[in-house]
Amino acid sequence: IFQSHEEDDRKVRRREKNRVAAQRSRKKQTQKADKLHEEYESLEQENTSLKREIGKLTDEMKHLSEVLKDHEKICPLLHCTMNFVTIPRPDALTSCLPR
């Protein structure tokens, strides 16, 4: 009878220990899932911000390309035959400029 009582006590302690370990494990899993969710939210916000920045930079690039294209049409330096001289000289550049 005494031995059976000790075994019962051991079983109860083992079950309690196992229950506490299971609670710790579930809590740890929940914390890990929460941390991953927070990281996901942060990355989503960063992704949205980067997409917005890409849009702005794309618009700026289009605008600057158009400005450059318009400028190329009227730029005297691009249409000057002296532009093909291999060694640029100050007088060659100024001879292409309108007077």
Image: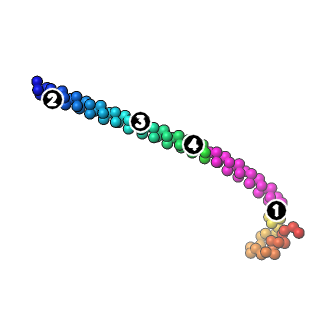
Residue at image position (79%, 59%) is 72
Select label 1 or label 3 by which is in front.
3
Q: Which quadrant of the figure has residue 85? A: bottom right
Where does label 4 land, which residue? 45
Select label 3 or label 2 by which is in front.
2
Decide which of tag 1 and tag 3 comes sooner along the chain.
3
Decide which of tag 2 and tag 1 comes sooner along the chain.
2
The vertical placement of 65 against 5, above or below, is below
Where does label 3 land, which residue? 30
Horizontal and vertical percent position of residue 87: 74, 75
Element on which disc 3 rests: helix
Label 2 to label 4, Cα distance in Å? Answer: 58 Å
Query: Which numbered disc covers residue 6?
Result: 2
Label 1 to label 4, Cα distance in Å? Answer: 44 Å
Q: Which quadrant of the figure has residue 48? A: top right
Select label 2 or label 4 by which is in front.
2
Instruction: Specify the quadrant that holds the C terminus.
Output: bottom right
Q: Is residue 79 visible?
A: no
Q: Residues within 10 Å of mark 1 (few under 14, many from 20)?
A: some
Instruction: Specify the quadrant that holds the N terminus.
Output: top left
Select label 1 or label 4 by which is in front.
4
**Which stretch is magenta?**
51-74
Q: Residues within 10 Å of mark 4 (few under 14, many from 20)?
A: few
Disc 4 residue type?
Answer: Gln
Select label 2 or label 1 by which is in front.
2
Where does label 1 land, which residue? 75
- Please identify the dominant SS of the magenta region: helix
Element on which disc 2 rests: helix
Residue at image position (64%, 48%) is 53
Horizontal and vertical percent position of residue 75: 82, 62
Element on which disc 1 rests: loop
Q: Residues within 10 Å of mark 3 (few under 14, many from 20)?
A: few
